[in-house]
Amino acid sequence: MYDDISKEELIKLFPEMEKGGRLRPKGCVPRQRLAVIFPYKNRYSHLHIILNNLLPFLTRQQADVTFFVIEQSPTSTFNKGAVMNIGFLEAEKMARFDCFIFHDVDLIPLNDSNLYRCGPQPRHFAVAMNKFNYKPPYVDFFGGVVGMSREQYRTVNGNSNLYVGWGGEDDDIFLRLRRKGFPVARYDLKTAKYDMIKHTRDEGYADNPYKEIFLKSAAKRQDIEGLNTVKYKVNKVTFDHLYTWITVSINNVE
Ligand code: UD2
Ligand code: MN
């Protein structure tokens, strides 16, 4: 299931999807409507490999889910926190989603009991990964795949937009959650198990050298910087068969 697959093959495999990338079960109306948000830049093959895995997985979980690809313009350094904020805001404009799942484009869930739904606590889904010998790398790890309700994401003021380059944004939102009194929910290591498709660091995605400094002020900044201050421009929206694809520029950088 980790082999490359073309978009055309995927469309043939999942003809029942609705325009804009919505999958929903026949014969029942799920209680939650999910938005899966992929922060994305130049990972075309990963995107289709992950969909080849997530589509059957979420079909088995009887999910009503719409996929959003939020693509940052190619010339600027990737800012995953800002891209996730944009995904949340743009998805909100399209429909009333109950649950937002922010999903690395290279993480494949391995256990069907890892239920993609939101609850009273924000959930960290990707606890155990091949990359870290199927154990969390540290106690407060909140990276990879996480789920939050609309209210939870709004209460913490989303992600910080300051983390340009690799690292830190996941620890920042963990501190935001803690400050607002949200304990994080996690399934056990057998359930919350993932494989990361093997990859090297993307070009132009160097470690953010300021991440430790920013993390010190995470709690102080939280209400004045985040979802309520993200500056962006939508360049194009495409309602494709497999996903709603939104290309964006951040902070006036084309
Ligand atoms: C870890 C975290 C991830 C994030 C990152 C640091 C895990 C499982 N995940 O991932 O959640 O916190 O560290 O910021 O530990 N992306 C692109 N194009 C790019 C760069 C990134 O599409 O050029 C997206 C893509 O969805 C990718 C995600 O951002 O999966 C995280 O980037 P990564 O896979 O390079 O980082 P990684 O594996 O160290
Ligand atoms: Mn990765």
Image (cartoon, rainbow, N blue to C red):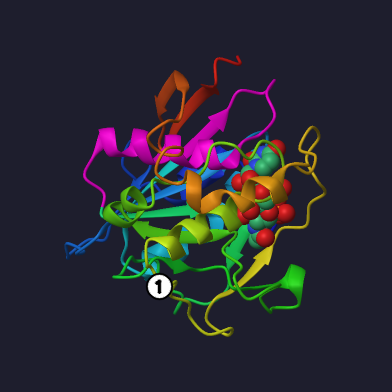
Residue 16 appears in view: no
Q: Which type of secondary structure does the marked residue at label 1 adopt?
A: loop
Foreground residue, 8 or 177?
A: 177
Foreground residue, 99 or 167?
A: 167
Residue 121 located within the stretch drawn in magenta: no
Looking at the picture, how far across and down is residue 186, in whole percent?
A: 48, 77
Foreground residue, 8 or 145?
A: 145
Residue 79 located within the stretch drawn in magenta: yes
User: Magenta segment, which residues?
Assistant: 69-97
Quadrant of residue 113 in the image?
bottom left
* Residue 159 to residue 32: above or below: above
Disc 1 residue type?
A: Leu
Foreground residue, 197 or 1?
A: 197
Looking at the picture, how far across and down is residue 224, in whole percent?
A: 42, 38
Q: Quadrant of the N terminus?
A: bottom right
**Tag 1 residue:** 115
- Relative side of 61 to 48, left or right: left
* Residue 230 to residue 249: above or below: below
- Relative side of 77 to 38, left or right: right
* Residue 44 to residue 140: above or below: above
Looking at the picture, how far across and down is residue 197, in whole percent?
A: 71, 58
Looking at the picture, how far across and down is residue 9, in whole percent?
A: 55, 44
> What crowding class fits label 1: few (fewer than 14 Cα within 10 Å), some (14-19), or many (20 or more)?
some
